[in-house]
Amino acid sequence: MARRPTIRDVAARAGVHPGTASRALNPALPGRIAAATALRVRTAAEELGYTPDPTARSLRTRRSGVVGVVVPDLTNPVLPPIVRGVEETLWAAGIACLVADTDNDPAREAVAVRELLARRCEGLVIATATRASATVRALAGADPPAVLVTRDVEDAGLPFVAGDDAGGVEAAAHHLLHLGHRRIAYLAGPPDLSTTVTRRAAVERAFADADLVVASARTYGIADGREAARDLLASAPRPTAILAGNDMLALGVYEALAEAGLRCPADVSVAGHNDMPLVDRLDPPLTTVAIPRAEIGVAAARVLLDRMAGGGDGGGPRRTLLPTRLVLRGSTGPPQAAASRARGLG
Amino acid sequence: MARRPTIRDVAARAGVHPGTASRALNPALPGRIAAATALRVRTAAEELGYTPDPTARSLRTRRSGVVGVVVPDLTNPVLPPIVRGVEETLWAAGIACLVADTDNDPAREAVAVRELLARRCEGLVIATATRASATVRALAGADPPAVLVTRDVEDAGLPFVAGDDAGGVEAAAHHLLHLGHRRIAYLAGPPDLSTTVTRRAAVERAFADADLVVASARTYGIADGREAARDLLASAPRPTAILAGNDMLALGVYEALAEAGLRCPADVSVAGHNDMPLVDRLDPPLTTVAIPRAEIGVAAARVLLDRMAGGGDGGGPRRTLLPTRLVLRGSTGPPQAAASRARGLG
């Protein structure tokens, strides 16, 4: 292919000295040039598709033009829109993203962060493998700046950007209470993630006056959701509604209901969290809490850019919680009060 | 946080000269050292969590340790498992991935490749925005090496890794013929992608003896699929089966069927392509062609590593087509021959 155009090519096309071309394209360099000359240089640069050489610039400025993005599992449908939001926002600021997948493994997370720092990343955006991540805690107050996204790490002292999970769970709980449910089950995710802790605490607050039973799934996967849902369905009296920690767990509830010959929502209402693609097309379509995934990515990138530009935290690390939205679909309905009372007695 | 350990830290811990430590960790450097010393240095390096500094090494070796991955849309559910397969395979070889999203826009693709090359990527993995990409064609036969994944570019002369789409489509077509369908519609994707061309050609071969009607969707999105499906359902006699270019288009067919008050598969059978997450849980579950997404990513990374190590093409660029698999579910069944004949006359 054609080689990248250099500043010399731009200078030749504009009919100026290379030093003049450099100054025209980088106002931070010393020396003044006429506006008409600067315009001619910029036009030539654009026509040639000239971009400054980031490696050469990196040697002068000690900046790599690269940020590291650490995710637990890119195939988790929550994450690609977030990564895309991060990537597009940083790209617009001239920064490229190194993406590393940790497979939810703290040891791989440690290696990923070390290798990204070794590549002189100017910042990190991290969806951590665990809320007790020592790797993440070690990043606090140091260079380069780091921002946590969707999953928080306790006492890490780092900025955090996510959906307002507590608000979303509260809306789902009020919806179920308003439908008349009083015997309610919560299917919580694995306890090593902040999302689980935040959502569960909100559920316990919202159902303080209801009959709440809680089970924990080992992972946020369908099979583990099904297993935990079996226990919930076996409890007596059987709950009339199951709120699941996320949509994958709700799919596990659907499977457990089918195994038990129970209908949704006639026998048991089900609600999820995240509004994953296609849950609107399930049978029945899933009531769930939608989180603004792309916007979370954009916001995380903006917080990071602000930190990279030297912005600090007045009074503790910034927490950005973007509004979530309860999406009502066919999986929730009023309880069959009489029927469930009869079963409760049996 | 603690600073990265340097080669000096490793040397101090092992009780050797820094030059000795360097040679122990990099057999390519000149000079010999005793096996016991080498072992002591490697142990010290491991204990300290030492990794060589890629930027410093890059200055010596002119290698960046970075590969660029260009995708049309990370939120397209086909792509994250492929990107993860690429990323994990390269990571195991000590190479990090810069990921750039082009939003299916050739202009953004051009900028992405230029910026990735400016960051001295040692290779590129590209799922192109269009099968006529001038940006991709310009990469042929040049440094750094590039590999195309899932989407080919005609006459680009670059290695290509994908699922065996033609084989998958052929299996789906034989399934429909075997069920007894003879009046069949194909809902093709947009003509600017190689996947569309490959799949459509296979359909036309497989249904050479059947009554085949074809419509093209403007994009691989649900709404465009619905629009094109409306036309297909309005054709007389109405097809008894619709094969869709991918699962998103099949979802559009589902919507068009619902609008027209038609049942699937009783009135019209539907099959898709890709086996996206959750299409097994639609109503009805979708018959589709599964492509080995993670394996495609792994294979693409391996081809690239081979090229980066100097491996060439004996007799034209390598094409790697991994086996696809027809997954039979509830959306396909035998045609209601009598009923469809009656409607065809009406």
Image (cartoon, coloured by chain):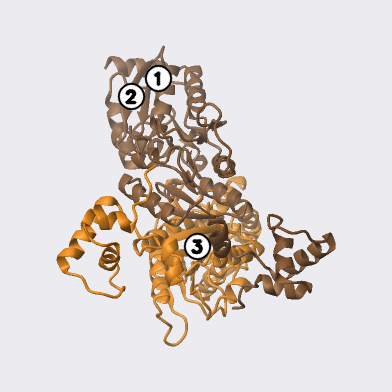
Chain colours: A orange, B brown
Pinpoint residue B131: horizontal percent, then vertical percent: 37, 35
Residue placed furthest toward the top: B209
Residue type at tag 1: Glu
Q: Which residue position holds label 1?
A: B204
Q: Tell me: residue B92, above or below residue B132.
A: below
Residue placed furthest toward the right: B36
Q: In the drawing, what numbered circle is on residue B214?
A: 2
Q: Is residue B335 visible?
A: yes
Q: Which of these two is toward me, A214 or A75? A: A75
Q: Secondary structure at mark 1?
A: helix
Q: Which image quadrant for residue A40?
A: bottom left
Are the numbered discs 2 and 3 placed on the same chain, yes or no? Answer: no
* Closer to the eye: label 2 or 1: 1
Marks 3 and 1, how far apart in space?
Answer: 44 Å
Q: Tell me: residue B323, above or below residue B16.
A: above
Q: Residue at x 47, y 32 (%)?
A: B331
Pinpoint residue A208: horizontal percent, then vertical percent: 53, 76
